[in-house]
Image (cartoon, rainbow, N blue to C red):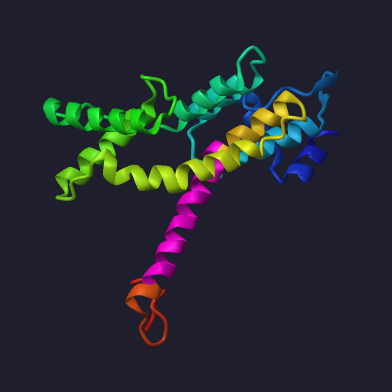
Amino acid sequence: MRISQLSAASGVPIPTIKYYLREGLLPAGEQTSATRAEYGARHVRRLRLVRALLEVGRLPIAAIRAVLKAVDDETLSMHHVLGTAHYAIAPAIEPHPDAEAWHAARSEADRLIADLGWQVDAHAPTRDELAQVILTLDRLGMPTTGEALRPYAETAMELVTEHEIGTIPLDRTREEAVEALIIGTVVHGRALDVLRRLAQESASARIFGTRAGGADRGPDATP
């Protein structure tokens, strides 16, 4: 298909497609002449993946480029590609001024991971993210230990992640399987957060009751 057809099939404007080509986010098409290239189903899938990482995952271009590079490297295992995605979406953790408090929070995070028997690299950024959560809650007067976080890990995360990994289409091409893995990591992560907030609102209405006229309206809603 020509670039105009690729645009129609993917819903991505032609100028944006050209930008992705320049940035290396989209593989070049098969050159059929000096001014014309042909594109296929692979390009449609890649455009949809890039848009999902941008619009739902909210990843910067540099992070998306790193993830896609791992997707295209057939020498990398699925586990390595997943790790690349985790590193790409991890927020930057600034050094904490209280080294002792940070060390205690990190130790608590490491202890929880070890107690759960999870196989997580010692340098994984997610360890620091969890430590930051523990430290922040402690500073807010809500001391949190690994034991307090265990219900989240055991009752929710293991069930969700087992389901996600189980939906990867291993009977298809490696590229399709890896793309599904990336979507499950980045996009489903956003879905999980939204579903948790929806469930919170439902539980709040059930436990605390609702006002006449509806309690689910935001603070700026018209009475």
Which residue: 59% across, 33% down?
182
Find the magenta span and give its range: 185-204
Whole-percent x and y of residue 185?
54, 37
From the viewer's perspective, tell me whether residue 190 is left or right of residue 126: right
Which residue: 49% across, 28% down?
63
Question: How many numbered discs?
Answer: 0
From the viewer's perspective, tell me whether residue 151 is left or right of residue 147: right
Query: In the image shown, does 158 or 134 lie closer to the viewer?
Result: 158
Vertical placement of 83 versus 183: above or below?
above
Q: Is residue 92 visible?
A: no
From the viewer's perspective, tell me whether residue 83 is left or right of residue 31: left
Q: Place residue 134 in its image quadrant.
A: top left
Which residue: 18% across, 50% down?
142
Give yes or no for residue 195 being in the magenta stretch.
yes
Give yes or no for residue 44 being in the magenta stretch.
no
Q: Is residue 200 visible?
A: yes
- What secondary structure is the magenta-colored segment mainly? helix
Whole-percent x and y of residue 193?
45, 51
Q: Place residue 101 in its image quadrant.
A: top left
